[in-house]
Image (cartoon, rainbow, N blue to C red):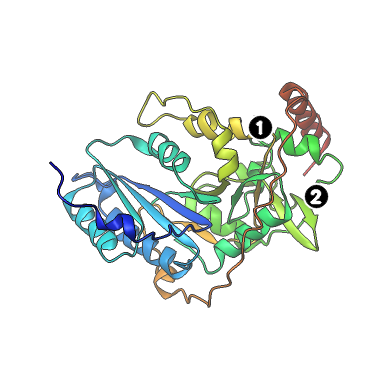
Amino acid sequence: MRIGQNPEKKKFNKIEYKQHRVIIPVYIPDSHDQYFNNLFSVLKISIDSLLKTTNKTQTNITIINNNCKKEVTNYLDSLLQDKIIDKHVKLSTNYGKVYTILSEAKASYEQLITIADADVFYFSNWLSNTIQVFNNYKKAGVVAPLPMPQSAYYCNHSLFFDKLLKVKKGKVVLDEDILLFEKSVNSKISIEKNNWFKNQLYLEKNRSKTCVGAGHFIATYRKEVLDKINVEKPKYIFENGAETFHLDNPIDKLGYYRLSTIKTFAYHLGNNIPNWVKEYKFSELNLTENSNKIKFSNSFIPYKIKEITAKIYRKLTTI
């Protein structure tokens, strides 16, 4: 039998909602495989840079623990206990990235959701520059805080259909920013093969240029767009093309764009920590408010027509 009344009922405490949430899935097992040797150090560097480049009044942080080893779990518990992060999701099994981010993102209340790998190094003001892109383009569905010119055509058919005559070609991304991305992923093939060093595709509004295309290792999504996706259950823990199937293609079919900043504000560490990361000087935060203005897409135009339009544009455009 219940005795008395729950005192919380009389407090009428309001829930504080923020405009942005970062969701980071982590998998660092108790393994002797060389691949995992340095990942815990990488994770701590990543989280430290995230905390130095975000403000608690604006951003909540969720870390998904995919059955990590005890040392990592204790570290994440301490972050939660000290209220450095907002949420620590513990799983008894490694469910991978797609399974976990879909469930957490759909359950979040924030207007903007950043999904990032656990090995991202964040540069100062990555978030304010990302939000500025959303504010400039009401149909921006996904924005990456680093230029991804080689991904311009990837799941971006709606953009080329809508902005066919407004997509510009020119040198707007500095070589040093492209080289930084190449170094982070240890690959030159996709950029050099199609000569993305020479020219990039971009949009321009309010004297601000935005690169066409966005990648995967870090990207920010409009919550309203994620809510529209009909989630299908992932079949595998890790599967090539899973993010394309569950996230990227559905967002494109809904009529929203993939864009990125023309300056690099994030670096993919992998399982190594370069010396310059330890010496990086963080600057004072610039807080930008999300206008929360979204233009809902008209779905009466068949997606196939958008796809054909994008393919014709690509065939006729020489980078």
- Residue beneath the point at 32% across and 54% down: 9
Q: Nearer the viewer, residue 313 or 66?
A: 66
What type is the residue that disc 1 sits on? Answer: Leu
Where's the N terminus, which quadrant? Answer: top left
Q: Secondary structure at mark 2?
A: strand
What type is the residue that disc 2 sits on? Answer: Lys
The reply to whether residue 262 is visible in this rendering is: no
Q: Which residue is mark 1?
A: 254
Residue 1's place in the image compared with 267, above or below, is above
- Residue beneath the point at 35% across and 60% down: 85
Q: Quadrant of residue 170?
A: bottom right
Residue 132's place in the image compared with 227, above or below, is below
Direction right: furthest residue = 165
Image coords of residue 185 (percent x, y): 48, 49
Where's the C terminus, which quadrant? Answer: top right
User: Distance from label 1 to label 2 (Cα)?
Assistant: 25 Å
**Crowd band around label 1 with a 10 angstrom C-alpha radius: few (<14), some (14–19), many (20+):** some
Residue 118 appears left or right of 312: left
Image coords of residue 94 (percent x, y): 28, 36
Q: Which residue is mark 2?
A: 169
Q: Are marks 1 and 2 in contact (CB under 8 Å)?
A: no
Image coords of residue 231 (percent x, y): 49, 28
**Crowd band around label 2 with a 10 angstrom C-alpha radius: few (<14), some (14–19), many (20+):** some
Marked residue nearer the N-terminal end (1 or 2): 2
Q: Secondary structure at mark 1?
A: loop
Q: Nearer the viewer, residue 116 or 230?
A: 230
